[in-house]
Structures are given as C-alpha cells and as structure tokens.
Amino acid sequence: MFRNISFTGLGITVVLVLVGAYFTFTAVQGNYGLFRRIQIEAEAERLTLELARLETQAARMEILTRRLSDDFLDLDLLDERARDVLGYVRPDEIVLP
C-alpha cells in the first residue's frame, strides 16, 4: 500500500511548499515587502509634514530678515528685537514673567 508513494514526488512537493512559503514570507516581511512599504509611506508622510513646517519657518525668517535689511527697515521690529536681545525695558512698561 505505501510502496506506491514515491519519495521523489514527496520531496519535490516539500521543496515547492518550502519555496512558496519563503517567497510568501519575503513578500510580506522582506526589505521590499508589504510591511516595509507601509513603514516607508508613513515616514514619507511624516517627512512631508516636517518639510511644510520647515518651509513655513524659512518663509517667516525671510520676511523678518527682509524687514531688518538695509533696503527696508521696520523700526518697530528693530525696537522689538533690540529689547528682546538686550533685555531693555522702558520706565513706563510693565513686565510680566
């Protein structure tokens, strides 16, 4: 009864199942698998938000730099920055900590 089973056929079947399991595992867990793709997409979204925040900050810094340049001097901004950096306060001002 068991003599008709070929060990070669059984061996090929086991090898094919193992190869299929390996490729399935790699497709899900590997360097280019589904989980890695989800991680990369999440990181890309986080970096896109960070880029937008940094671009907004850079634009604000450009505006402040322009307002303090020799071509266009904003006296109110200059007064504010000088007071902040030097720690000066007018006698009629109240400072809240």
Image (spheres, rainbow, N blue to C red):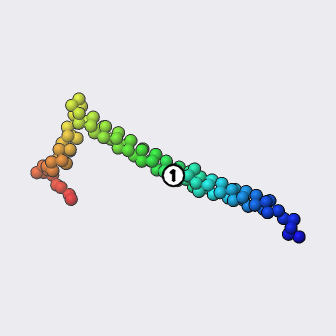
Looking at this view, is 68 or 47 the one in front? 47
**Residue at (49, 47) in percent of width and height:** 44
Return the residue found at the far left: 91
Query: Measured from the top left, where is residue 52 in percent x and y?
Result: 42, 44
Residue 7 on image: x %, y %: 79, 63
Q: Residue shown at 87%/65% (left/top)? A: 4
The mark tally for this picture is 1
Quadrant of the drawing holding the N terminus: bottom right
Disc 1 target residue: 42
* Residue 24 in view: no
Identify which residue is drawn at 63% across, 53% down: 27
Q: Type of residue at label 1? A: Ala
Q: Is residue 18 above or below residue 73?
A: below
- Whether 70 is drawn above or below 82: the answer is above
Q: Nearer the viewer, residue 64 or 92?
A: 64
Where residue 54 appears, as percent x and y from the top left, is 38, 44
Q: Quadrant of residue 95?
A: bottom left
Q: In which image quadrant can residue 97 be found? A: bottom left
Q: Could you classify mark 1 by the number of other residues whose Cα lies within 10 Å: few (under 14), some (14-19), or many (20 or more)? A: few
Mark 1 residue element: helix
**Is residue 42 left or right of 25 when viewed as pictured?**
left
Decide which of 32, 59 is in the foreground and name it: 32
Q: Residue furthest right?
A: 1
Image position of 8 (left or right of 59): right
Residue that sits furthest to the bottom in the current view: 1
Q: Is residue 12 visible?
A: yes
Question: Can you name the residue that lies furthest to the top here?
Answer: 71
Where residue 62 appears, as percent x and y from the top left, is: 31, 37
